Structure formats: C-alpha cells, structure tokens
Image (tube, rainbow, N blue to C red):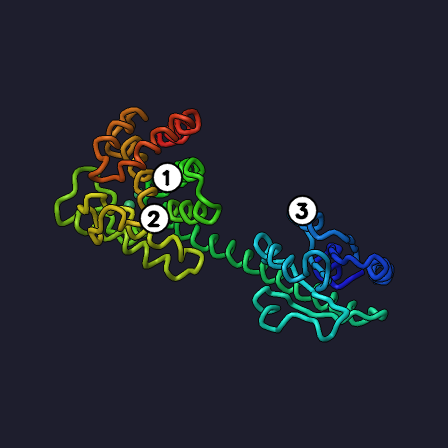
C-alpha cells in the first residue's frame, strides 16, 4: 500500500514521460514493486492528450528529449493542469533547467537519473504525502463550510420563526437564481455565490421590529426608512462567516436600482455588481408574483410586464430580457416555484 492509499484510500497514479525506453522499463519494474501504478509514455504529445482526459497524481518527466524538451512540455501541462505534482528528471547534471524555471513551472522535485531508484521512490512518496495533505485540507474546509451553512441555516430558521414569509421567499429567490444563473452560463463559483446570496439576502430582517416586518398594510415613510436598513443588517450578520465573503456585495446591493434610485448607497448602472443586478431581478420577480400576507399572487406574465416596466429604471434592461427568456424556457419549473407561494 502506498502513502496516498494509506491516507486517502485510493491508489496513486503516476505518468512517466521519457523517450529512453530502456530506462522507462527499468523504472516501471521498480516502481511497481512499491505498489505504484505507473503509466509510461515515450511520446510527449500522446502523453499530453492522455493527461487532458485522465486523472493522474504525479507526472515524472525527462528533461532532455527529442524533439521537445521536458520543461516545454511542463509549460503546456500547466496551461490546463495546475494541480499535478511534477518531478523532473535528467541524466545530465550540467544540463538541467534553472531553479527559476522550475519554480515558475511549479515543478516540485528533481531527480538525477541513476540505475538506483530509491531516491525516486522517496520523491514519489513525498509527492503522495503532499497530495494526501492537500486532499485532507480540502475535505476539512468542505466540512467546515457545511457546518457554517448549518449554523447560518439556524439563523434563517430563526428569522422564519418570526417571519415565515421571508424564509419561503428566500428559498424561491434561490430557485429562480439557480435557473437564471445556469441560463447565463455562470461559472460554478459565481452560481454558488449567487445562490448563497439569494438564500440569505433578507436575513437582516431579523433586526427589523415586528410592528414593521409583520405589518399588513402600507409602511409609513419612517417605517420604510427602517425597513431599508435590512440589506446592511444582512451584510453585517453574514460578514462574520468567510463562506459568504463573495456573496456580501450581492446582499448589500440587492435593493440598488439601475437608475441610482435604490438603497442603501444609490450606486447605479454597471457600478452595481453584475451578480447583484441578477439577484435583484430574481428577488423582485418573486416579490411581484408570489402570494403575500397582504396580497394575492399574480401571474408570471404579469411579473414579466412589471419587470419590463422597470427595465432601465429599477433593473438592468439587458438582464430583464434574458430573465424573461429564461423563465419562458423553464416555464414548468418556474410555475412550480411560483405555486409554492400559495
Ligand atoms: Fe430585501
Ligand atoms: Fe428579498
């Protein structure tokens, strides 16, 4: 059992690229004895293609090869794979790349070729230890993130106990955001930022007095001014937890308007972060169409009209057209989200 298997529970996979077939054969035999799975390649371009389509933990690559040198191959590898642990080897002590080149290409280890492979085995093992510690750290931070979300969920439920509408509203906004974020081809990270912000954007309503929050009728100007504090209260609450870091601007600016007449800061147009403009539309669409304690639900089509009325005023006009197209494309799903408010 190798180090990686002992710590992470899977066998490590090593790619070796060397045009010296004799050396490669000898190396493969020795490494297999240590239970290291080795996939050899004598042709760098074929190896590159294989590396693009398969998972490897370690790449061992010869420096002096024809027609392409090992460091040039590593440069190409780093364009699409920043994670793989790389060991460069050379049979010529005097002909090795500089330390600066190795650093810039993130080559982690260097092996001087000899018929004894003990040193290479040690380098591979320390590579596996390094990979195992990174994987453990990733698992740990993922667990911590999950705990953090659970804790903030308690907060959301607390708000829900006081004002169930806000919690249900946030869940629906998160669902619209998921559909719209996918339609906009957001990266996984941006989609996550958007959906987290949607789930928690109104959490600051916990800081608004019941007489205002649960008031059925129209708010007085004074009450409305107080209500307008909720994006800042939400931002303040969530800023205590690192997982919300990227979502904070979305939460803070979800009531800003494209024409600058929003709150809390009055920023306008593209000064409002893109994802905040996306969230504002999902938020408003639910506010317009969902059933509320003091008003009946309206149709999705009515929601489209209202959004179009606010295009260029409250909302980013380009995003409005995209949102409407997105909801039309995902009509059944949107209808189900809408219906869950009745
Ligand atoms: Fe809000
Ligand atoms: Fe909201």
Name the residue tied to disc 1. 173
- Distance from disc 1 to disc 2, alpha carbons, whole Å, reads 9 Å
Q: Where residue 52 sits: x, y (%)?
A: 64, 48
- 145 shown above or below 313: below
The answer to whether one can see residue 301 in this image is yes
Q: Position of residue 63 (x, y in %)?
A: 70, 64
The residue furthest front is: 67
Q: Are marks 1 and 2 in contact (CB under 8 Å)?
A: yes
Among numbered discs 1 and 2, the one appearing first in the sequence: 1
Q: Is mark 2 within 8 Å of ligand 2?
A: yes
**Which residue is label 2 attached to?**
201
Residue drawn at (31%, 31%), measured in percent from left and top?
Answer: 321
Residue 267: horizontal and vertical position, in percent? 22, 51
Point 70% across, 59% down: residue: 58
Answer yes or no: disc 1 within 8 Å of ligand 2.
Answer: yes
Q: Nearer the viewer, residue 200 or 56?
A: 56
Occupied quadrant, residue 119: bottom right
């Amino acid at each position: 059992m190798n180090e990686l298997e002992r710590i992470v529970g899977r066998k490590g996979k090593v790619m070796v690229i060397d045009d010296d077939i004799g050396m490669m054969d000898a190396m493969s035999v020795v490494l297999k004895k240590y239970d290291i799975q080795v996939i050899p390649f004598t042709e760098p371009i074929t190896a590159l293609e294989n590396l693009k389509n398969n998972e490897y933990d370690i790449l061992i690559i010869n420096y002096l090869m024809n027609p392409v040198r090992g460091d040039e191959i590593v440069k190409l590898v780093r364009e699409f794979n920043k994670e793989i642990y790389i060991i460069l080897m050379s049979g010529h002590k005097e002909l090795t790349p500089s330390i600066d080149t190795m650093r810039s290409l993130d080559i982690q280890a260097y092996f001087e070729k000899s018929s004894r492979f003990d040193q290479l085995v040690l380098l591979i093992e320390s590579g596996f230890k390094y990979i195992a510690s990174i994987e453990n750290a990733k698992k740990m931070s993922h667990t911590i993130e999950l705990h953090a979300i659970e804790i903030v969920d308690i907060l959301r439920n607390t708000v829900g106990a006081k004002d169930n509408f806000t919690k249900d509203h946030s869940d629906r906004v998160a669902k619209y955001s998921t559909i719209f974020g996918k339609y906009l081809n957001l990266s996984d990270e941006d989609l996550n930022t958007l959906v987290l912000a949607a789930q928690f954007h109104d959490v600051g309503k916990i800081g608004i007095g019941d007489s205002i929050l649960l008031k059925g009728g129209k708010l007085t100007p004074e009450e409305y001014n107080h209500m307008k504090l909720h994006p800042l209260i939400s931002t303040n609450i969530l800023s205590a937890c690192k997982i919300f870091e990227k979502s904070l601007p979305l939460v803070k600016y979800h009531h800003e308007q494209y024409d600058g007449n929003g709150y809390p800061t009055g920023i306008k147009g593209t000064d409002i972060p893109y994802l905040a403009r996306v969230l504002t539309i999902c938020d408003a669409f639910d506010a317009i169409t969902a059933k509320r304690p003091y008003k009946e639900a309206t149709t999705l089509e009515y929601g489209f009209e209202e959004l179009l009325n606010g295009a260029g005023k409250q909302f980013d006009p380009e995003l409005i057209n995209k949102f409407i197209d997105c909801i039309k494309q995902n009509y059944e799903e949107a209808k189900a989200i809408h219906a869950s408010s009745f």
